Image: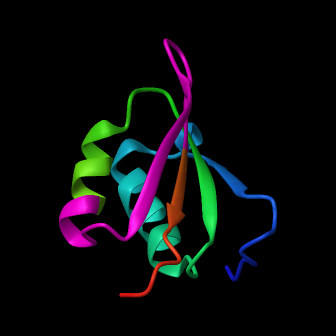
Amino acid sequence: MAQAANAAPNEIDVRTLVPMQRHQKIFELVDQLAPGGKFVLVNDHDPKPLYYQIEAEHPQQFSWTYLERGPEVWRVEIGRLSKAA
């Protein structure tokens, strides 16, 4: 999935996926993001553990912004920072 930095972010609703498939799908999207790219993750619980996993594997390379914080739906914008490595 190529995405221009200024395009509207894609939204992925993982609530329809089997729980064991969710992280795999999210990490596929994270790995495909170009610098400046982003997507919105929609989940049925706070995905904060995912934040820690992304940060551990890709330190200071991604942004994490809550757009909605439950109690039934969480929406988080995840973006690849465009700063030079």
**Dividing the picture into quarters, in which one does residue 14 lie?**
top right
Which residue: 72% across, 58% down? Answer: 10
Verify whether residue 43 appears in magenta: no
- Against 32, is 72 above or below? above
Which residue: 45% across, 77% down? Answer: 31
Which residue: 25% across, 42% down? Answer: 49
Q: Residue furthest left?
A: 56
Residue 27, position as x, y percentages in the image: 41, 66
Q: Residue furthest bottom?
A: 85
- What stretch of residues is rendered in magenta? 55-76
Q: Residue furthest front?
A: 84
In this view, the residue in front, 68 or 71, is 68
How is the structure coloured here?
rainbow
**Dividing the picture into quarters, in which one does residue 37 lie?**
bottom right
In this view, the residue in front, 7 or 19, is 7
Residue 36, position as x, y percentages in the image: 61, 73
In this view, the residue in front, 23 or 71, is 71
Q: Residue furthest top?
A: 71
Verify whether residue 70 appears in magenta: yes
Residue 77, position as x, y percentages in the image: 57, 48
The image quadrant where one finds the N terminus is bottom right
| Label total for image | 0
The image quadrant where one finds the C terminus is bottom left
In this view, the residue in front, 75 or 43, is 75
- Against 69, is 1 above or below? below
